[in-house]
Image (cartoon, helix red, strand yellow):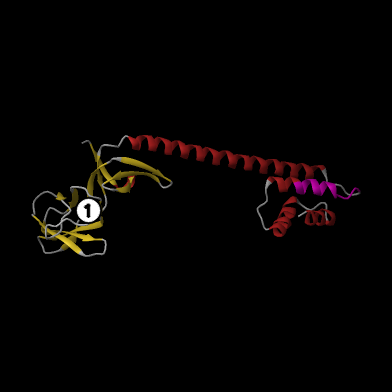
Amino acid sequence: MDNALKKIAGSNNTQSLQNVSSQTNEAKQNVLGKDDFLKMLITQLKYQDPLNPLEGTEFSAQLAQFSQLEQLANLNSYVKQSVDANYLLTQSINNTMTAALIGKEAKIATNEISYKDQEKIKLGFEIPSNARSITLEIYNEKGALIKSVSIQSGADTERLYEWDFTDNNGLKIPQGKYNFSVKFVNDINMEGTADAFLYGIIDGIKFTQEGAMIKTLGGLYYLYQIYEINNK
């Protein structure tokens, strides 16, 4: 970089600092910072022609440009520090508030089930008021159907089904991952799939790089997956 600066200053000591910056960027292939700016200014003064020195107005303009560059760099640093501090403060507040959810019941937007020897689990779903022929189906991790239940139709759009972790033969299933879906046919014979959710007591909070997660039903769920919180 020094050789490039000497060549620029010796060839034309009245060249504008914008051109000096442009040529230096081409040589360095990098963003010009305030330290590089100051180094160029000193080099330009060092190698100026004594018989044709920089004019005072030109030198003053270059100093003003350096001052503006330094102020912008400092401002950018202050803004970044302020944003980082606000983010950490927000995360701290969210973490503190999330801890207060322990012991409450959460309605979670998911159809995935983690079976770890629980006695039962509440499966929820929401259907139109005109839904008929409602069927809840539960699948294992390999996609095999292990449980099929016919749900009685009614006026309530939000329904619950308590599953005791048995299959269609009444046998206990092995621990593992499962999922469920609810299909229906309405009164004009149109098929549909209901929105599914689970109910579970929050028994812990885990703080991760992606944000706080609740522990319930043998699994971890993000806060954005929670539909509602109920006291139990």
Tell me the quarter of the image containing the C terminus. Answer: top left
Horizontal relation, residue 102 to residue 57: left or right: left
Q: What residue is drawn where x is 72% and y is 41%?
A: 64
Residue 143, image x, y percentages? 24, 64
Horizontal relation, residue 82 to residue 147: left or right: right
Q: Which residues are magenta?
A: 39-50
The residue indicated by pointer 1 is 196
Residue 24, image x, y percentages? 73, 56
Is residue 68 on the magenta stretch? no
**Local secondary structure at mark 1:** strand
Magenta part mainly helix, strand or loop? Answer: helix
Tell me the quarter of the image containing the N terminus. Answer: bottom right
Q: Is residue 158 visible?
A: no
Amino acid at circle 1:
Ala
Considering only vertical position in the picture, is 202 above or below 15?
above
Considering only vertical position in the picture, is 62 above or below 23?
above
Q: Residue furthest right?
A: 51
Horizontal relation, residue 113 to residue 184: left or right: right
Q: What residue is drawn where x is 32% and y is 48%?
A: 220
Depth check: 47 or 100 in front?
100
